[in-house]
Amino acid sequence: MNNSMKIFKIFGIDIKLHFTWWFVFALIAWSLSSTFFPQFFPNLSNQMYWIMGITASLLLFVSVLLHELSHSLVAKAKHIKVESITLFFFGGVAGITKEDMKPSSELQMALAGPIFSLMLAGIFYLIYIFNGNIFWTAITYYLWQLNLILAIFNLIPGYPLDGGRAFRALLYMYYKDLRKATKIAVSFGRFFAGVLIFFGIFGLISGVGSGLWFIFLGGFLYFIGGVSYEQVIIKEVLGKIKVSELIDKKFVKLSSKMLFSDFVKKYENSVNDIFIVKDTDFFGIINLNEIRKMPFKMQQNINLKQISLPMHQLRTLNVDDSAYDAFKSFAEQGLDLLPVIAKGKLLGVITKKKVLHRLVWDLKFGINKKFVFKVKKNLKSMPKIKK
Ligand SMILES: [Zn+2]
């Protein structure tokens, strides 16, 4: 995830803060010290409220981090790679990379987070009840409730919330069809989003509860459901295709000493549109973003080496990678073309255009074989056109 800052590493997992974290942290600390604590624990000093507010919001984020860590540690126990955890907004995201996960693993992984949050709620509740210090009583009063809310909200059986992931895993076990399972779990998520928004509007009209908060959560859940459904589809289609199927072995090799202006002149009407730059001491791909930044005059005198990304700066692809790996790599590196390497040698290149083309074709004609069959049958039964 971009726009985030690595703060430390634990169990081999990078812990990152998304830039939105700072705003939410400040907002929570501010609302706690100006409203929540003075309301429930009156007659304390302003300074005290601020220390409480900052401590409580820090501990809330520690709670969110522990929630995400419990997902990640279960994942690691299942030999699933976890690269990072990003804390953002009002939650966290664990960067867990695995194309096809066993539904039983996903079920355990999904439930680990809410279970840990429930445990934290219990621990904070006990501290709240049994400690005699007003400072910790106030903070744990807030934290046990928030951890309970975190657990309950995440257990809503709507994808992509934890409860939705667990629900999808159960559906996947039953139907053996990831798309169908995801579709149902997303629909549930949208239903709950609708319910939340309904209660939010009801709350706003009647003045009971925090209506806006409900509308906000509902809207978020609705939006994220659609996005993750698309992601699942893309992953499912492209994850099954090997890079080797889409590789282009026909490309133009250009000398790194060639002037950019000569290159444009030579190839402006050419059918070739896949280029790599290679000679004895240089190997890389042309980076058009570099050229766009340059003044026109400079473009005339520059050679290809100066506007190329050298190989060692690229994350190249392997023959065994999936088209989904390529898809992600294009997006992460902001490139339209990547070299495919096998045993240290250039095997060919893969273009974003080709990957997207394959995606569109598979979605339209490939996956649903029944659909293709139906079309063929319909074509046969169509009346012949009279000449
Ligand atoms: Zn979770």
Image (cartoon, rainbow, N blue to C red):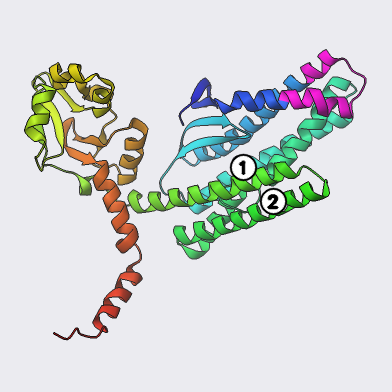
Where, by quadrant of the figure, is residue 342 drawn?
Answer: top left
Q: Quadrant of the C terminus?
A: bottom left
Q: Nearer the viewer, mark 1 or mark 2?
A: 2
Q: Is residue 133 left or right of residue 1?
A: right
Label 1 element class: helix
Residue count near mark 1 (Cα–Cα under 10 Å), binned few <14, some 14–19, many ≥20: many
Front-most of 301 and 15? 301
Find the magenta span and give its range: 29-52
Residue at 61% over, 42% down: 112
Q: Is residue 56 visible?
A: no
Residue 17: quadrant of the picture: top right
Q: Amino acid at mark 1?
A: Ala
Residue 237 covered by magenta stretch:
no
Return the residue nearer the eye: 34 or 207. 207
Which residue is pictured at 33% across the width and 50% down the height?
238
Q: Residue at x 26, y 78 (%)?
A: 379
Give the image location of residue 62, x and y in percent.
Answer: 66, 27
Residue shown at 54% from the left, 50% from the top: 225
Q: Residue 243, percent across and down?
A: 25, 45
Q: Between marks 1 and 2, how big is the CA–CA gap?
A: 24 Å
- Horizontal and vertical percent for residue 7? 54, 19
SS at mark 2? Answer: helix
Numbered-mark total: 2
Q: Which residue is mark 2?
A: 196
Is residue 258 toward the left or the right of residue 288 in the image? left
Image position, residue 48 (x, y; %):
83, 15
Q: Amino acid at mark 2?
A: Leu
- Indicate left or right for 329 with 288 as reference: right
**From the viewer's perspective, is residue 286 above or below residue 357?**
above
Residue to which mark 1 is pinned:
112
